[in-house]
Image (cartoon, grey):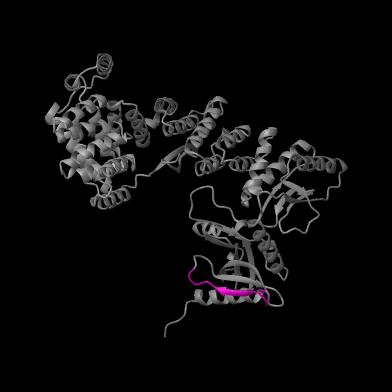
Amino acid sequence: MPKRPRSHRLEDISIRRFEEALPESWVPRKRTHDYGIDVEIEVFSDDDQSTGDIFYAQIRATDDPKKKKKLTLDVDQLEYFRSLDLPTIIVRYNSLDESLYFKWHFDLDLPATAQSSITVTFTDDDLWTTETPAEILRTVRAGKALRAFSAAHPLPLVVNQTLESVAQSYEFSRAWERLVKATPVVRISEGGQPVELVITASKSGILISIDRISSVRVDHDYNSAEELFAIILYSLIFITHQVGLSGQSSQLAELALSLGVKATARPLAAQASAALVSRPLDAVALANLNDLANQQDEFLVGLLASLHRSSAPRILRLNATASLYDYALAKGYYEGNAVAEAAITYSLGNVRRGLGDFRGAIQAYVRARRLRPDYQNSSYFCGELAGCLFLSRRYAMAAQLYGKVSEDEPSQTTSLLLGDALLLSGNPSEALIHFGVAQGSDIFPLSVEAAVKAELCDWLISTYGESFQRKFSETSERIVQAEKQGAGPDYWQTLLDESDPLDPLSNFNAAKTRYDAGDLIGAYYRYLIVALSQPGDAEAWHNAFVCVMQDSSPRFISTLSLALWQCGREPYDILRRKITEVNAEDPLLGELDKVADDLAAQGDHERFENLTVRLFRDDAFDAVFEVPSHSA
């Protein structure tokens, strides 16, 4: 006969033991399909009236006496508990003595480093007793009150002290009284409120808390009201921000910034700066006040993560980050530590790149490489520097670096980038080889893009040869002369033939001439050159696919695809507007809209751009945050 596993029996026993420990009026309900939640508990009053107070429990059982007070919890589960509207207790049941221990999910910290699980350790204070249900109910109600608490309301502040020294008591009183006078965020309370900030000063230190939901403990000798003020202020910021009272936390953080008050500990400084991330420049100003960038640790990474996940405009986030790095370098935090200084400088380069300051980014990358020569052997360094060189029109140098990346870490994406650099440096025959590799990609947008560019290479080779020189200076001078003299159509074609076959302005003018002459394919390739040289030029993309649309060419779909993926919906919107001007009831318009929608969805042109922050700590350099590339 099949035998039931001990683990299954133990699970049932532990849940039964937990339910027995609850008051009779509380109703437990098993959750069989919830990730990590075993029981939902609804609190009813002694006369069976619903209170609306609900919490969750995960119950973990063991037979092992060595694991009586500890268990392993997946980080994913802890993050899930944090995402829920209701609080969760993690309960440890030991079958040997039928004891129960518990912690709230908010008692546990997420790890600072990448790891899949954490060890939860229970103490004697976590033992379940007859008083535990009342404590749990108080915490559940405090959490519910917090969720409903208005940003406009001041927080009740309860002050307790058991200091024996008159001098210490005086300094402590000066500190908290100054805080109450300085901000409307808190008000003195006698206690008994659903939500209370409690400051307890004792011989062992200062404890500031909201029930068990959040707390800060700081050791102090109470000899300086100034330091005590800073401790209390930053601890209140930490707690209010942690429990989601963003209005109160930002007001308190503004007070710290306006008064120039520094935190006494890095965790408090980092949380206070994060409380201001909706105003990135203020967040960084507070971080700089606290010298937060003088160490490359989890607190700096945490601030950067909060900053770049905020709803503030992207340009503000990046400018604020640049000012953080600039401040660190100007203060000389890392003088004498070339590798650490190189990491900060490299990260500054990434931010400059995100801002579109490619010259500034290149300067930062080059300085980082001088400080840490090993960077030049890294594919990520070569790729990011190559991208800036490409966008600065230094195509040949970009091609050299992409070539190195392709040799070290070959991929179809890198082949596409290398093809781009070779094409715009005047080597269509070499570019064609790499576009051919990229065409083999299983990623539809990448393969289509490579196919369009490969066809352009074939046309350039047949028109101008396998390679040609791009005479940028000569072309610029001739364009200036043409604009002064009012050059005719033939002039632009001559300029293409003699100076630069890929010059955007000359190709635009030559394309108009070819279009008027009925040479739609000749016009198409020239408009395509303009669009690829200036990917954000919606009119150029529109002009390109208009040519192939009128020619009934299969190129229309691939060109429309590329336009949508590289420039968004604007080129198609221009086309659609012009069609409706001619015939607003065109029956093909609906079908065309559907095609455009499908293509846009496949390419997902509203992409996310990685802002890579490289920190030097135990030889680990990478912390990557996703920054929306389309944010305002």
Q: State the residue at coordinates (15%, 44%).
A: 552
Q: Is residue 311 depicted above or below 332 in this figure? A: below
- 194 vs 548: above or below: below
Between residues 533 and 575, which one lies in front from this camera angle?
575
* Residue 139 image position (x, y, % from top left): 68, 61
Q: Quick check: 519 left or right of 199?
A: left
Question: Which is more toward the observer, 360 or 618?
Answer: 360
Q: Would residue 594 be visible to someone looking at this image?
A: yes
Q: How many marks?
A: 0
Q: Position of residue 259 (x, y in %)?
A: 70, 33
Residue at 77% x, 59% y is 192
406 or 605, which lies in front?
605
SS assignment for the magenta stretch, majority: loop
Q: Is residue 31 magenta?
A: yes
- Whether residue 412 is visible to the viewer of this picture, yes or no, is no
Residue occupying the far right of the picture:
166
Quadrant of image for the N terminus: bottom left
Q: Is residue 440 magenta?
A: no
Most distant residue in the bottom direction: 1
Q: How far across and how far down the image is residue 122, in percent?
A: 63, 61
Q: Quadrant of the C terminus?
A: top left
Q: Nearer the viewer, residue 514 or 49?
A: 514
Residue 452 in picture, x, y percent from top left: 21, 40
Q: Is residue 366 left or right of residue 287?
A: left
Magenta span = 22-33
